[in-house]
């Protein structure tokens, strides 16, 4: 009987030590709802990361609208970009839901960082070329993925939070990066040799966009 007792005392001692250090705040309180069972560094990192997801969603949305205009008429990449915006937004919502389960208040309504710099983004997008849009999409996916790894690092002792971010969010990020790399390679192959022939390049871009619209390129990314 002495071993179970010693084991129990050891566990309680570890829990008391962890609680005393303030690392894992899992103490019963009154006056609910309140923050409970969370690691401050983890929840702060999640709060900060939501901004990156929403920034990516907003940028994707503007890019999708730009290529969907009748004067540009590239419905394939427009559809892809708008779906990408939906995915990034869904990630942000998933993170907000997670914070809510822990009783953590979102900083969205109070942080000045949630300024999407609309005019600057529009000015940078309105003359964007097709290949630049694909490259910018890849760059955004990589940047967001790096930020997610930083969140996972901050949540390494909060196994639930780390699991939320690694599956399915990280899997979706890596899948998207790989498919965008393939799309850029396919676009470059199709347009190679036509950079000095405007009409031929435009036709190659049109053909590529039709393939995007039919799901023959980047199928199932989002």
Image (cartoon, rainbow, N blue to C red):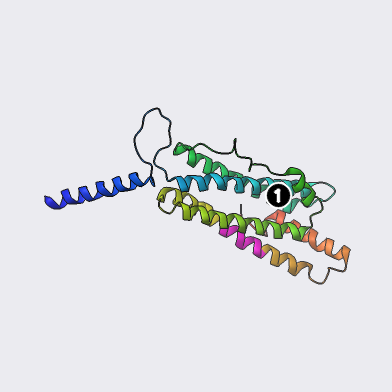
> For the point 16% across and 48% down, which residue is it?
5
Q: Relative to 195, is 76 above or below?
A: above
Residue under pointer 1 = 79
Is 127 left or right of 103, judged from the image as shown?
right
Is 181 one of the magenta-colored residues? yes
How many numbered markers are drawn? Answer: 1
> Seen in the image, is 36 located left or right of residue 174?
left
Q: Residue at x 59, y 54 (%)?
A: 144
Decide: is 29 above or below 128: above
Q: Residue furthest left?
A: 1
Magenta stretch in the rendered image: 173-182
Residue 181, given in percent of the width and then of the height, sits at: 65, 64
Percent position of residue 123, x then y: 79, 49
Picture coordinates of residue 16, whole percent (x, y) = 29, 45
**Which of 51/197 is in front?**
51
Q: Secondary structure at mark 1?
A: helix
Horizontal side, residue 58 vs residue 167: left or right: right
Q: Is residue 91 above or below residue 200?
A: above
| Residue situated in front as seen by the camera: 211 or 95 | 95
Evaluate whether residue 160 shows in this view.
yes
Q: Main secondary structure of the magenta part?
A: helix
Please tell me which residue lies in front, 213 or 70: 70
Tell me, yes or no, if residue 91 can be seen here: no
Instruction: Identify the residue at image location x=79%, y=67%.
Output: 191
């Amino acid at each position: 009987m002495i071993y179970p007792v010693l084991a129990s005392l050891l566990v309680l001692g570890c829990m008391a030590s962890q609680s005393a250090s303030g690392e894992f705040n899992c103490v019963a309180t009154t006056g609910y709802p309140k923050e409970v069972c969370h690691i401050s560094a983890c929840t702060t990192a999640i709060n900060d990361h939501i901004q990156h997801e929403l920034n990516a969603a907003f940028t994707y949305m503007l890019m999708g609208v730009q290529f969907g205009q009748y004067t540009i008429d590239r419905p394939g990449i427009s559809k892809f970009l708008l779906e990408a915006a939906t995915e990034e937004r869904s990630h942000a919502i998933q993170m907000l839901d997670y914070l809510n389960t822990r009783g953590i208040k979102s900083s969205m309504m109070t942080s000045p960082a949630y300024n999407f710099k609309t005019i600057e983004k529009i000015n940078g997008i309105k003359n964007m070329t097709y290949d630049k849009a694909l490259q910018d999409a890849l760059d955004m996916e990589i940047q967001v993925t790096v930020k997610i790894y930083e969140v996972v690092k901050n949540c390494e002792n909060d196994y639930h939070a780390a699991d939320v971010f690694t599956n399915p969010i990280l899997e979706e990020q890596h899948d998207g990066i790989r498919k965008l790399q393939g799309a850029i390679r396919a676009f470059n192959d199709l347009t190679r040799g036509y950079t000095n022939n405007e009409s031929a390049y435009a036709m190659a871009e049109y053909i590529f966009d039709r393939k995007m619209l039919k799901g023959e390129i980047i199928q199932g990314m989002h």
